[in-house]
Image (cartoon, helix red, strand yellow):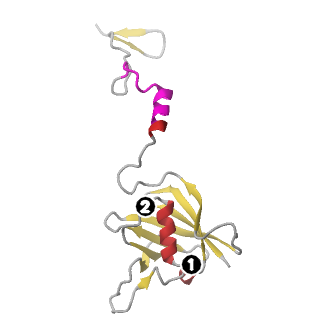
Amino acid sequence: MALLRFRVYWEDDDQIYRDIEIKATQTFLEFHKVILTAYEFDGKHTASFFESNDRWDRGRELHSEVLVNKKDAPALSMMRTPVSALVAKPDQKFVYVYDPAKNWSFLVELIGVVKDEDPKHTYPRVFRKEGVGPAQYGVKGVNPDKLMEIEEKYDLSNEDMMEGFGNEGEDGTTSFGGDESYSEE
């Protein structure tokens, strides 16, 4: 069974991305869930995939909830649509939007197709992470041990340091990189 490989970029910074493998027969709902896991989002909000072109224009929408379109026909649903049904070209693109109120947007691009799946893996799966993803709510927590290690390494707790500046020039002299000094009198 074929595996589709997608790169999911955070729209605000294309240096932050996750590479995901998914079976061609798996649904967009499964794809949605693995993206949330990859970026450590909680999954409490709605989401949509939009078919896209090379300029990332949004086309037809697949929503995480079953909706009705303008002509009272059911809209495309993530739950019922296999990923392969909307992959028409080798560089297929989608825009993924999570939590419409916050408008978390990700650019999704097909980067490859693998003929055979590896029986050691469960799909869909994240096989590469690049960069620190955005924090869904506020700032991601900093490990206190890591903060202490940085503080010790750079001696950030030194009481002589105030507001990020040293005490050079407090005696009325300023050094210009050499041995000469300038006195303010």
Choose between 93 and 47: the one closer to the eye: 47
Amino acid type at circle 2 is Phe
For residue 26, which numbered disc appears in the image?
1
> What's the magenta region?
147-161
For residue 60, which numbered disc appears in the image?
none
Measured as percent of width and height from the top left, residue 121 is found at: 65, 67
Query: Split into 4 quadrants, where in the image is the C terminus?
Result: top left
For residue 41, which numbered disc appears in the image?
2
Amino acid type at circle 1 is Gln
Measured as percent of width and height from the top left, residue 5 is found at: 61, 69
> Is 29 covered by the magenta stretch?
no
Residue pictured at 37% horizontal, 72% vertical: 46
Q: Report whether residue 54 is seen.
A: no
The vertical placement of 16 against 107, above or below, is above
Instruction: Report whether 133 appears left or right of 71.
Output: right
Residue pictured at 39% horizontal, 89% vertical: 74
Residue pictured at 69% horizontal, 66% vertical: 120
How many neighbours does mark 2 have within 10 angstroms: few (below 14), some (14-19), or many (20 or more)?
Answer: some
SS at circle 2? loop
Q: CA distance from mark 1 to mark 2?
A: 21 Å
How many neighbours does mark 1 have within 10 angstroms: few (below 14), some (14-19), or many (20 or more)?
Answer: some
> Is 150 covered by the magenta stretch?
yes
Choose between 177 and 161: the one closer to the eye: 161
The vertical placement of 40 against 74, above or below, is above
Measured as percent of width and height from the top left, residue 75 is found at: 40, 86
